[in-house]
Image (spheres, rainbow, N blue to C red):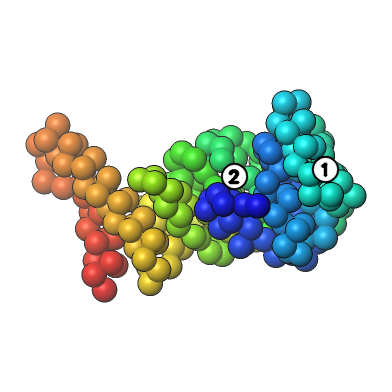
Amino acid sequence: MLNDQRLLACAGHVSGKGIACDVGTDHAYLAAYLVKSGKCGFVIASDVKDGPLLSARATIEKYGISDKVMLVKSDGLDNIPPDNVSDVIIAGMGAELICSIIEKAPWLKNGVNLILQPMTRAPFLRRWLCQNGYETDAETAVKDSRFFYAIIKAHYTGISHTPDEVFENIGKMDLSDDVSREYAKKQAERLFKAGKGMLEATGGETNSALETAQKIKKLLEG
């Protein structure tokens, strides 16, 4: 039913304690998986466009779960009823859009479990979460072909801080996991490349990108 590793990893972080909401559901494959696997008794699947919602309806009718999945046309979480929602999954979007969706839904601060999978700028998302009172509980790295993705599990604590650059780049990845280690290695390589470019441009001795890359490398060696 679900062979997308990103979505399977997202499903793994769903608590199953109440209603799960899949934002930008597309074909509702994740919603169907959560219900059919027994992880969730009821799921809200939303999308901003009619086309994906039609595809989503076809999926839930195919699996006979129309009574357990509610389809909602919504820009982000704007039209989502928050009652009994325990988990919100926002996957497959850019970091800035994810932040905007969270910011416009203050009810997420009431103990809701967030599962976030940014397609771009994961460091930006990690920093934004920290600076806006959200704590990262865990992260999972997924490799799809040559691309790596981070799945971030977080909740609101009200405690805001600015994270260091190591956390921005690798978050709470479990470095005992092979894919997470490979993810961290890729981030270090990216920072080394950027840092060397800045070094050549400025003629300086070092910079924060190089220093962060060295710190990540030490963590991997440790």
Q: Nearer the viewer, residue 192 or 27?
A: 27
> Which of the 4 image quadrants contains residue 135?
bottom right
Q: Residue at x 26, y 46 (%)?
A: 191
- Image: 142 above or below 173: above
Q: Residue at x 61, y 62 (%)?
A: 12
For the C terminus, the image quarter is bottom left
Q: Tell me, yes or no, if residue 39 can be seen here.
A: yes
Q: Nearer the viewer, residue 169 or 56?
A: 56
Residue 214 location (% of width, % of height): 22, 58
In-image side of 157 versus 201 (left or right): right
In the current view of this chain or complex, which residue is farthest to the front? 62
Q: Secondary structure at mark 1?
A: helix
Q: Which mark is residue 61?
A: 1
- Under mark 1, the amino acid is Glu
Q: Tell me, yes or no, if residue 135 can be seen here.
A: no
In the current view of this chain or complex, which residue is farthest to the top? 50
In the current view of this chain or complex, which residue is farthest to the right? 67
Q: Earlier in the sequence, mark 1 or mark 2?
A: 1
In-image side of 113 versus 187 (left or right): right
Q: Residues within 10 Å of mark 1 (few under 14, many from 20)?
A: few
Quickly name the residue at label 2. 91
**How much space separates mark 1 and mark 2, taking CA atoms?**
23 Å
Q: Secondary structure at mark 2?
A: strand
- Under mark 2, the amino acid is Ala
Q: Residue at x 72, y 26 (%)?
A: 51
Residue 150 location (% of width, % of height): 47, 52
In-image side of 64 versus 100 (left or right): right
Q: Residue at x 84, y 50 (%)?
A: 65
Residue 20 location (% of width, % of height): 75, 54
